[in-house]
Amino acid sequence: MKETAVVILNFNGRKLLETYLPSVVKHSHQAEVIIIDNASTDESILYLNEFYPTLQIVSLDKNLGYAGGYNHGLKFLNNKNFLLLNSDVEVTENWLGPILEFHQSHENVGCIQPKILDWNDKSKFEYAGAAGGFMDKDLFAFCRGRMLSELEVDSGQYDEPLEVFWASGASLFISSAVFNDIGGFDEDFFAHMEEIDLCWRLQNKGYTNYCVPQSSVYHLGGGTLSQQNSHKTYLNFRNNLFIITKNFGGVLFFKIFYRMLLDGIAAWRFLFRGEVANFIAVAKAHFMYYWHLPALLKKRKKCLPKEKMEIKGFVNKSLIYSFFILKIKKYSDFIKQ
């Protein structure tokens, strides 16, 4: 058994496995490649058994989402380190080397992500992580290389390793010891943004998260929420409120009130564009937030540190104001304003 496992969570992803798994198997000789299957009903398992009969498959009884799928699937593995990889990621030659070397040479490492580029346009950063995740003063997530929906061209401008607020769940390295210490992902999230919650909890416990751009991958996934993605809209708005309630150490009432006000503006914007399903999704997200609030407040007591921690990757500027009013569309311009 190798120390590191590249672990791919699969749910009805045969076509994705056909496209992206070959590069993972070819370029991951430093690690085992393991599939956790979230009770797929397509021919994923048949495909794996036929074309990759030596790969280990952990089969779950039902679809537990991203958070639950990894939490339960990783319990069956004894590797020292995990690289959690989306099934729609193409990796590059020696992509693991820089991450493993960085982890070995640094202490108190929480998560590490590589540079994540867009599979559809490999000259640009990708929405879900780019060159590392950050948080603005209103607790909106953004990235080095991605401001809201604006993607920058990668010209090597963000190639230095950097401490970040959060690392992308599309390609996330974490040791099994740290994963178990923090209690894994919060399964109430099901999917979307659970890695931001994980990384914030890691920081609250004294760990540091990093982006190591000397490693790079290409991710198919995108950040556009369409009318057909109303469930994703629901999860994103709901989970944002979950994250803030659990982890924000300041006066919670005013932060949540302001955030819900901005959510309301976004909801009406959906409605005016004719996206009724997304409008309803935001309303549902707020309702379910109130439903979960008692449990979230209990979690908050466990998540907040006893002593004030320095949170890395927090930027005390307004992303929304800078983007829409000042027309700042690049991370480097946002940081230095």
Image: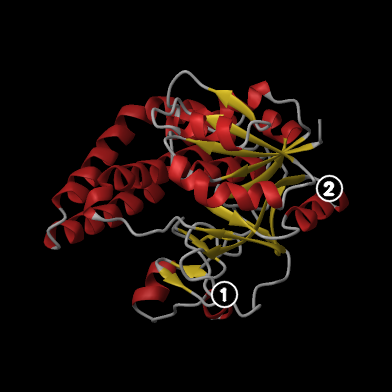
Placement of 241 over or under 145, stated as above or below: above
At label 2, the amino acid type is Glu
Residue 17 placement (x, y as % from top left): 52, 44
Q: Nearer the viewer, residue 300 or 292?
A: 292
**Residue at left 24%, top 49%?**
228
Placement of the N terminus among the 4 image quadrants? top right
Residue 75 placement (x, y as % from top left): 65, 22
Q: Is residue 171 visible in the rendered structure shown here? A: yes
Q: Nearer the viewer, residue 106 or 155?
A: 155
> Which is more N-terminal, label 1 or label 2?
2
Query: What SS does tag 2 mark?
Result: loop
Tell me which colouring the rendered structure shows. secondary structure
Q: Which residue is mark 2?
A: 107
Q: Which residue is mark 1?
A: 335
- Specify whether 187 is left or right of 216: left
Camera-side mark, 2 or 1: 2
Q: Is residue 249 visible in the rendered structure shown here? A: no
At label 1, the amino acid type is Ile
**Residue at left 54%, top 36%?**
9
Query: 10 Å neighbourhood of mark 1: few (<14), some, or many (≥20)?
Result: few
Q: Nearer the viewer, residue 274 or 50?
A: 50
Residue 289 placement (x, y as % from top left): 33, 35
